Image (tube, rainbow, N blue to C red):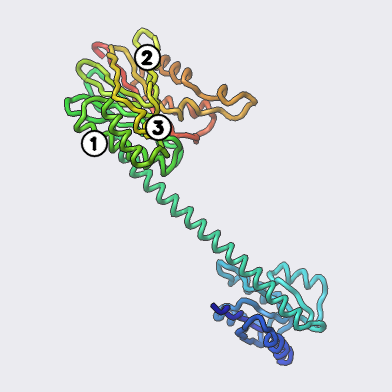
C-alpha cells in the first residue's frame, strides 16, 4: 500500500523562499507531499483549520502577525490532538527567540540563511514523526479513558443487577429474628447470601464467597445462586443440592473458579437446621455463652466433580441461641501497617464473636450493620479490600 502524502503548509510572505521550500520538497525521493501556501498569518491559521496539514513551515516575520502570535492563536484553536508539527523559519533571530518559539509549541527552529535541502527535509520528517507519535499516544489514552468509563458503567450496571438478586428483606418467621447484609469491595462482588423457600415450608440459608471480587466472581456468584435455587425446587437435602450444584459449576469453569458455601435448611417449627458446607465455617453462639465453630469437612465448590459428597449434619436451635455466618472479608480486614505481622493486624474471628456476645440482645439487623461499622472503625478505613457479608439467625426467648 502506497504511503499517504505528507501535507505541508508554507506560511511565508516571500515568494522566493516559498519556491525554495517547494523545490527542496520535490527533490525528496522518499516521500510525496501535498503543499498549501499562505502569505499572511491569518491565511495560515485558516488553512490549518481547513486542511489540517501534518507540518507547517512558519515564517517568523509576516505582514500581519509574527510567529509567536500565530503559535498562540493555534494553541487556542487546537483540538484534542493538539498542534501540527510547526517548524519556525527566520532570516535572523536570537537564542531567546528560539526558546520562546519552542516553548510556544514549535518543534524546530531553522535559519533561512544557512538552510539546506537535507536540513529542511530531516526537520520535516523528524517533527512529523514526533507529532504523529504524540497524537497516537493521545488517541490511545483517550480510548483507554473511554474504555475505562465503559467498564465502570458496565460494572455499575452489573452491580445494580447483582444487588437486585440479593433478598430485599429477611424472612419474617415467628420466634426468629433474621438479619443479613453484603458490602461489596467494588461495584460488583463475589459474596452473596440468599433465603430460599423450600417445598416443605422450610427456609434455605445460603452464604457463598467466590474467590476474588469484581465482575468475574460476581457472575460466578449469580450462577451459583441460580443453580442452588433451581435444585432446591426438586431436592430436599442440602448435601444432594451441593453435589448437583458442584457438578454444574465444574462443567462451566473446569476448576478455574471456586466458591466456599454454606447451605442450611431451617425448619421454622422444630428449629432444626440441616446443613452441608463446602469450605465455609459457621458459628453457634449458644444461650449459655458457649461458642461452637462448625467447620466444613469438604473443599469449596467448583474445584472437582468428585470432591463434594452427599453429606449433611443437623443441629437444633434453642431459645436464646444465635447462629452466625460471615465471609472472610470480615475476618481478614486489617488495620494499617504498624510493624506487626499481617495476621496480628487482622480483625479476626475472635473480635467478631466477642462483638456478637456483647451485643446479642440487639435486633439481628442492627447487629449486621453495627458489625460492618466496627470493622471499618477497627481498620480506620471506609473502604475495604474484600467483600463483607454477614447472616445472623437469632432464636427469640419465650415472650420476646
- Residue named by callout 1: 230
Quarter residue 218 falls in? top left
User: Does residue 224 appear to the left or right of 185 in the view shown?
Assistant: left
Q: Is residue 315 above or below residue 389?
A: above
Q: Is residue 85 visible?
A: yes
Crowding around mark 3 (Cα neighbors within 10 Å: few <14, some 14 to 19, many 20+) is many
Q: What element carries label 3?
A: strand
> Reading the chain from its start, which is encountered first: label 1 or label 2?
1
User: Does residue 200 appear to the left or right of 159 in the view shown?
Assistant: left
Crowding around mark 2 (Cα neighbors within 10 Å: few <14, some 14 to 19, many 20+) is many
Quote the CA–CA distance across marks 3 and 2. Answer: 22 Å
- Residue named by callout 2: 285
> Reading the chain from its start, which is encountered first: label 3 or label 2?
3
Q: What element carries label 2?
A: strand
Q: Are marks 1 and 3 in contact (CB under 8 Å)?
A: no
Quote the CA–CA distance across marks 1 and 3. Answer: 19 Å
- Point out the frontmost of discs 1 and 2: 1
Q: Which residue is drawn at 30% across and 30% down?
A: 243
Q: Which residue is drawn at 45% across and 20% down?
A: 352
Q: Is residue 147 above or below residue 240?
A: below
Q: Percent from the top left, x then y, of residue 215?
A: 41, 44
Q: In this view, does 249 lie above or below 372?
A: below
Q: In the depicted view, which residue is nearer to us: 376 or 132? A: 132
User: Does residue 189 appear to the left or right of 267 in the view shown?
Assistant: right
Q: Which residue is drawn at 50% across and 35% down?
A: 385
- Point out the frontmost of discs 3 and 2: 3
Amino acid at each position: 500500500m502506497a504511503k499517504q502524502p505528507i501535507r505541508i503548509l508554507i506560511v511565508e510572505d516571500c515568494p522566493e523562499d516559498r519556491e525554495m521550500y517547494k523545490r527542496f520538497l520535490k527533490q525528496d525521493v522518499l516521500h510525496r507531499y501535498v503543499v498549501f501556501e499562505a502569505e499572511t498569518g491569518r491565511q495560515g491559521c485558516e488553512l490549518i483549520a481547513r486542511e489540517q496539514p501534518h507540518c507547517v513551515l512558519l515564517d517568523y516575520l509576516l505582514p500581519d502577525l509574527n510567529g509567536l502570535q500565530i503559535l498562540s492563536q493555534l494553541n487556542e484553536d487546537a483540538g484534542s490532538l493538539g498542534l501540527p508539527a510547526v517548524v519556525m523559519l527566520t532570516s535572523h533571530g536570537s537564542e531567546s527567540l528560539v526558546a520562546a518559539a519552542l516553548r510556544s509549541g514549535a518543534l524546530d527552529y531553522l535559519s533561512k540563511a544557512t538552510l539546506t535541502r537535507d536540513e529542511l527535509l530531516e526537520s520535516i520528517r523528524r517533527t512529523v514523526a514526533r507529532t504523529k507519535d504524540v497524537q497516537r499516544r493521545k488517541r490511545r489514552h483517550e480510548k483507554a479513558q473511554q474504555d475505562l468509563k465503559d467498564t465502570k458503567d458496565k460494572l455499575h450496571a452489573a452491580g445494580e443487577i447483582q444487588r437486585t438478586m440479593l433478598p430485599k428483606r429477611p424472612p419474617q418467621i415467628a420466634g426468629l429474628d433474621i438479619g443479613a447484609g453484603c458490602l461489596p469491595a467494588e461495584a460488583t462482588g463475589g459474596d452473596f447470601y440468599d433465603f430460599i423457600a423450600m417445598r416443605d415450608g422450610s427456609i434455605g440459608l445460603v452464604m457463598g464467597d467466590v474467590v476474588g471480587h469484581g465482575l468475574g466472581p460476581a457472575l460466578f456468584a449469580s450462577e451459583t445462586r441460580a443453580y442452588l435455587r433451581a435444585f432446591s425446587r426438586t431436592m430436599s437435602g442440602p448435601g444432594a443440592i451441593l453435589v448437583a450444584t458442584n457438578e454444574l459449576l465444574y462443567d462451566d469453569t473446569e476448576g478455574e473458579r471456586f466458591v466456599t458455601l454454606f447451605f442450611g435448611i431451617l425448619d421454622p417449627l422444630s428449629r432444626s437446621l440441616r446443613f452441608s458446607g463446602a469450605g465455609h465455617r459457621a458459628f453457634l453462639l449458644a444461650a449459655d455463652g458457649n461458642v461452637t465453630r462448625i467447620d466444613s469437612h469438604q473443599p469449596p465448590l467448583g474445584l472437582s466433580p468428585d470432591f463434594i459428597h452427599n453429606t449433611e449434619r443437623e443441629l437444633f436451635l434453642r431459645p436464646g441461641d444465635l447462629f452466625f455466618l460471615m465471609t472472610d472479608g470480615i475476618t481478614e480486614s486489617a488495620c494499617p501497617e504498624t510493624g506487626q505481622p499481617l495476621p496480628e493486624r487482622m480483625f479476626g474471628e475472635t473480635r467478631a464473636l466477642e462483638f456478637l456476645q456483647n451485643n446479642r440482645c440487639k435486633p439481628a439487623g442492627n447487629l449486621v450493620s453495627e458489625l460492618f461499622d466496627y470493622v471499618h472503625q477497627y481498620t480506620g478505613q471506609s473502604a475495604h479490600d474484600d467483600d463483607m457479608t454477614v447472616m445472623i439467625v437469632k432464636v427469640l426467648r419465650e415472650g420476646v
